[in-house]
Image: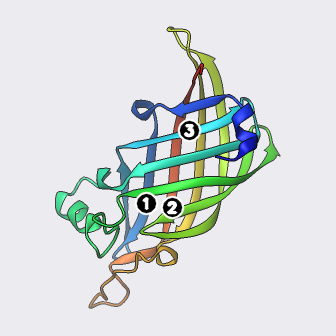
């Protein structure tokens, strides 16, 4: 994390109340959705002002779940995520710009399969609360779209009727619940 982040309160992602999801076109006629079940990370922010925030999110790529074990095994293979060599998907924010009414544009470095690219995402602050145990929590949602080829995830197969098996564009949705740390 950047040096200026040290002075900001530290929040950790609550993995049991956070999720990273994606959707991609399948055979040109439908959409397949999936999720990653294991995610961790830190956010340095003075909630509710995210303009100086810094975040790092690490997703365990092996935790992919599309509700089809054969497809999930293929997604873990060298054709897609190549988990043997690239077990994590990592996002590190580089700039967060307020857009008004709890909305933000988030620019950051996304690393998938050993390839890092700058991406621009849209975020929404969903609120802050003290839980029944005295912990401060906040919710934040992020949406965006990437081209999987930009990250070397290029496997595909042509369909007899025309078109391809897997679409190029991948829609991302991440819901985060952060818990403030006292130290």
Q: Secondary structure at mark 3?
A: strand
Of callouts 1 and 3, which one flags the residue occurring earlier in the amino acid sequence? 1
Q: Which numbered disc, 3 or 2, marks the residue that appears first in the sequence?
A: 3
Q: Quadrant of residue 107?
A: bottom right
Residue lying at 21% horizontally and 57% vertically, measured from the top left: 68
Query: Observer-nearest residue: 51 or 42?
Result: 42
- 41 vs 46: above or below: below
Q: CA distance from mark 3 to mark 2?
A: 23 Å
- Against 140, residue 179 (above or below) is above
Q: CA distance from mark 2 to mark 1?
A: 5 Å
Cβ–Cβ under 8 Å for marks 2 and 1: yes
Q: CA distance from mark 1 to mark 3?
A: 25 Å
Question: In the shown orientation, is residue 75 left or right of residue 24?
Answer: left
Residue 75: x percent and y percent? 29, 66
Q: Secondary structure at mark 1?
A: strand
Mark 2 secondary-structure assignment: strand
Q: Are marks 1 and 3 in contact (CB under 8 Å)?
A: no
Image coordinates for residue 156, horizontal then vertical, percent: 33, 82
- Above-or-below relation of 9 to 110: above
Residue at the image position 26 percent from the left and 91 percent from the top: 160
Q: Residues within 10 Å of mark 2 (few under 14, many from 20)?
A: some
């Amino acid at each position: 994390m950047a040096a200026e982040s040290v002075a900001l309160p530290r929040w950790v992602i609550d993995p049991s109340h956070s999720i990273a999801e994606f959707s991609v076109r399948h055979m040109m006629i439908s959409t397949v959705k999936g999720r990653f079940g294991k995610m961790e990370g830190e956010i340095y922010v003075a909630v509710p002002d995210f303009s100086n925030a810094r975040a790092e999110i690490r997703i365990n790529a092996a935790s992919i779940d599309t509700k089809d074990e054969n497809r999930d095994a293929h997604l873990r293979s060298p054709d897609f995520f190549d988990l043997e060599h690239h077990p994590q998907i990592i996002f590190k924010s580089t700039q967060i710009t307020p857009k008004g009414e709890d909305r933000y544009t988030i620019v950051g470095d996304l690393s998938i399969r050993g390839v890092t690219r700058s991406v621009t995402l849209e975020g929404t602050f969903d609120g802050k609360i003290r839980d029944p145990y005295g912990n401060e929590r906040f919710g934040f949602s992020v949406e965006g779209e990437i081209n999987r080829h930009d990250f070397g995830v290029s496997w595909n197969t042509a369909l007899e009727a025309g078109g391809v098996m897997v679409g190029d564009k991948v829609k991302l949705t991440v819901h985060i619940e952060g818990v403030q740390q006292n130290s």
